[in-house]
Image: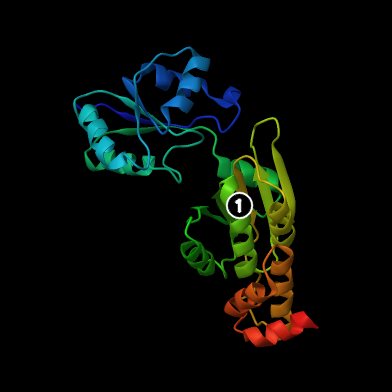
Amino acid sequence: MSGKLYVVGTPIGNLGDFSERGAEALKNADFIAAEDTRVTLKLLNHLKIKKEMLSYYEHNKNGRGGVIIERLLKGESCALVSDAGMPAISDPGEDLVRLARENGIPVESVPGPSALVTALAISGMPSGRFCFEGFLSVNKAGRKQHLNELKNERRTMIFYEAPHKLSATLKDMLAVFGDRKIAVVRELTKIHENAEITTLSAAAEFYGENTPRGEFVLIIEGAKEQEAEQYTAETAAELARGLIKSGYSMSAAAKEAASVSGIKKGDIYKLLLQ
């Protein structure tokens, strides 16, 4: 008889948020599959638990997943954890859960905090309908393609972003979405937790001049009805002006605004010069 895979949510910042049931799952599992064993060790030390750990992350999941499944099929139990939040959400644990189910291995949830719903809950942004888009591509072309696919999305959109990519991401969002409302949420459940409600242009300008610190959740209002959008030369130029404030050159801003609006770059450029 096979063992069981426990999908265990871990704190997103404050260790006090870990549940008693989560602690029991880690204590009773035969071993733990951890995204980063160094991070999980801090949690285990806090709980005074000693347990075998195997690293399971994006770059070793193909080989390590088979090892974990083999042990589960022999009857051992495994607790799957990520560095923070629920495993398998924007996380390679998704593949391990799928492998377990394909092999008839029982999977049990031990729910815990999730950054995306926590951020949404404190943002004040519309939460009746939303979509989670995870991390955008590091590659600029891939990032722009992803954003362009969402240009007419009317639901509230939620993204994760790392600090070193934040400035470029905000500029690209401004170029594609226009100047919408955004909640920039950082350091959830930690001492410096902060949710700033602002606009894409203001956020792009601020983080173009100030070094971002901490992990970020970005919550952006969806497109308004009819926003799929009838640009004029003047509204396209207004978009370009926002890009210039965020750090684009005049030429680059005109080019970006032209690609979004369909207005000729030269016409936009002339208005910028006035």
Residue 72 figure quarter = top left
Q: Residues within 10 Å of mark 1 (few under 14, many from 20)?
A: many
Question: Measured from the top left, where is residue 180 in percent x and y?
Answer: 69, 64
- Quadrant in which the N terminus is drawn: top left
Q: Residue at x 63, y 47 (%)?
A: 120
Residue 110 figure quarter = top left
Residue 212 versus residue 111: which sits nearer the camera? 212
Would you place residue 154 above or below residue 122 in this image? below
Question: Measured from the top left, where is residue 165 in percent x and y?
Answer: 57, 51
Q: Is residue 96 left or right of residue 43?
A: left
Q: State whether residue 180 appears in this view.
A: yes
Q: Report the residue marked by disc 1.
A: 166
Q: Secondary structure at mark 1?
A: helix
Q: Amino acid at mark 1?
A: Leu
Q: State whether residue 232 appears in this view.
A: no
Would you place residue 179 above or below residue 95 in this image? below
Q: Residue at x 67, y 49 (%)?
A: 184
Would you place residue 271 above or below residue 77 in this image? below
